[in-house]
Image (cartoon, grey):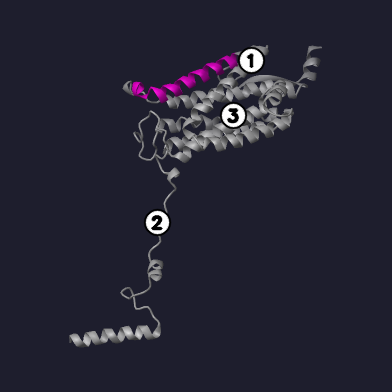
Amino acid sequence: MILDSVRRRAITGAHAGQTGDQPGDNDMSSGDDHVNRLPPASWELPHHLHRGSSEIDWCESNYAVSTTIAEFVNTFSNVLFIIIPPLLIILFQQYAKRTKSKAIYVIWLLLIVVGMASAYFHATLSFAGQMLDELAILWLICAGVSLWIPARYLPYLTSRYLPLQMNRYGFKWAMFAITIIGTILSCIKPVINAFALLAIGVPITVMLVVEMRRCQDEKIRRLGFRTCVLFVTAVCCWLNDRLLCDLWTKFRFPYLHGFWHILVFLSSYACCVLFAFFDASEIAPEFTPKLRYWPLDTFEFGVPYITLQSRTKEIKRDM
């Protein structure tokens, strides 16, 4: 019986060799054929997309509220970035039409991008989320500077830092190039990005104060004062959360970064409204810019926006 079984296996092997068929899994195939028959390796996300791949971890405890959202409060505190800018797009339609510039819509859209990128970062604490958050802020700042830096500063800035003088159009392209360079540099040393972005806010705040002192509109001055107070308070919250986490954890309040999101949004979009007011005075001299509040103009803690009134109608009304 044993000899017959051996003889049958020998005949089967010989038949497979004559017909060129592969005898199955127990044959002596070549190494390449063996590798080709291995199951494909399972696909994995790049490391930078993994949860927790960022070196930055804020004070709020991770996954304390939800098993899928790393920092719950820091994630949902970005909600104002998403719900207010669509309203601003509607409120600034007259402004965009009369100034013949729809670039302000880009600012409101970038605010939405900042909010979504920040929410993604704090929900995952991934390196990709961190870079999206920081780069969105960089692009927002550079877009605002290119649009609203007062025209009287352009000859000084371009003659000192650039080998030529240029108008607003040329300055926008120069700022676009600077933004691209800044984007590349931010990928080289991402740890310092947040501090660098905070540092950029200092000259912008100084410029805002200078413009406020030149303005005679008390309504604008009051909004400007509130904006500066909100920004300073926001920076204090950011620094406390970043540098004094152990102290605030002892007080069981590790949520200062969430307050940073709320305060920095309120100060940032108000700053955009103020610079839009100053810019309208220069680029649309036939109109008088007016600061309004939604939903009630008498309620100065509503949503500020700018309308433009015809100077001709004002003159006729005065006559």
Residue appearing at x 59%, y 29% in the figure: 141
Q: Residue furthest front?
A: 163
Is 227 a magenta residue? yes
CA gap between label 2 and label 3 equals 41 Å
The 10 Å Cα crowd at callout 2, few under 14, some 14 to 19, many 20 or more, is few
The 10 Å Cα crowd at callout 3, few under 14, some 14 to 19, many 20 or more, is some
Q: Quadrant of residue 223?
A: top right
The 10 Å Cα crowd at callout 1, few under 14, some 14 to 19, many 20 or more, is few
Query: What is the number of the mark on residue 141?
Result: 3
122 over 254 or under it: above or below: below
Residue 217 in view, yes or no:
no
The x, y position of residue 308, in whole percent, is 71, 23
The x, y position of residue 58, in whole percent, is 40, 30
Which SS class for mark 1?
helix
The kind of residue tagged 2 is Ser
First in sequence, mark 3 or 1: give its number.
3
282 over 192 or under it: above or below: above
Query: What is the number of the mark on residue 84?
Result: none
Q: Report the magenta residues as a range.
A: 222-248
The kind of residue tagged 3 is Ile
64 over 32 or under it: above or below: above
Total marks shown come to 3
* Front in this rendered view, residue 292 or 172: 172
- Principal SS element in the magenta part? helix
Residue at which label 2 appears: 42
Residue at which label 1 appears: 210
Is 151 a magenta residue? no
